[in-house]
Image (cartoon, rainbow, N blue to C red):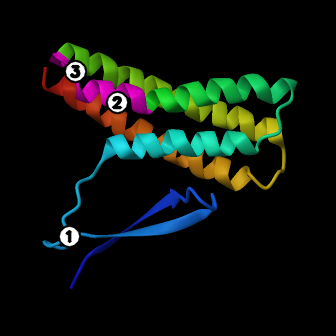
Amino acid sequence: MQNIKKQTIIDRNSFTNSELQITNSPKAALKYDLEERTEIFGENIIYLCKKVKVAPITRSIIDQLVKAATSTGANYIEANGAISKPDFKNKIHIALKEAKESRHWLRMLKVAVGNLPIQNEIESLSAEAQELILIFRKITQTLKKNE
């Protein structure tokens, strides 16, 4: 019997919540890919921001959100290519800070857009930002513990 793990993701085409089934059988061993996850997070933020009406209030929030969310993945990718342990540690800390900033800007965007239909997408992406924060925080704690 195969174990099935369901992961809530944002579908790129319809941008609605859907479920992805991942099988963990010996034949279909899948590698957990945090690089891909952070890239999808950044892409989904971009898709979300394209739906937001640009106004004086939302303009700066959108700019900051896109920068923080895409930087989360970029810094994690750089951490994986680090030339030293201190370099890795620094990039992971930056990825953590950018994920926290993304969560902050998502909260501000939620207030700025009011009760538009994109509230559910904002909440889903906020939850994903929180999960990334927990992952990066655990990595930094492990690094500190192993010093």
Secondary structure at numbered mark 2:
helix
Report the quarter where the N terminus lies.
bottom left
Residue marked by disc 3: 82
Q: Earlier in the sequence, mark 3 or mark 1?
A: 1
Q: Which mark is residue 28?
A: 1
Residue at point 49% right, 26% down? Answer: 98
Magenta: predominant secondary structure element? Answer: helix
Q: Amino acid at mark 1?
A: Ala
Q: Which mark is residue 77?
A: none
Is 79 magenta? The answer is: yes
The span picked out in magenta is 73-85
Residue located farthest toward the front when viewing the structure as drawn: 13
Q: With 83 as the anchor, is 123 left or right in this view? A: right
Q: With 93 as the anchor, is 46 left or right in this view? A: right
Residue at point 73% right, 51% down? Answer: 119
Q: Amino acid at mark 3?
A: Ala
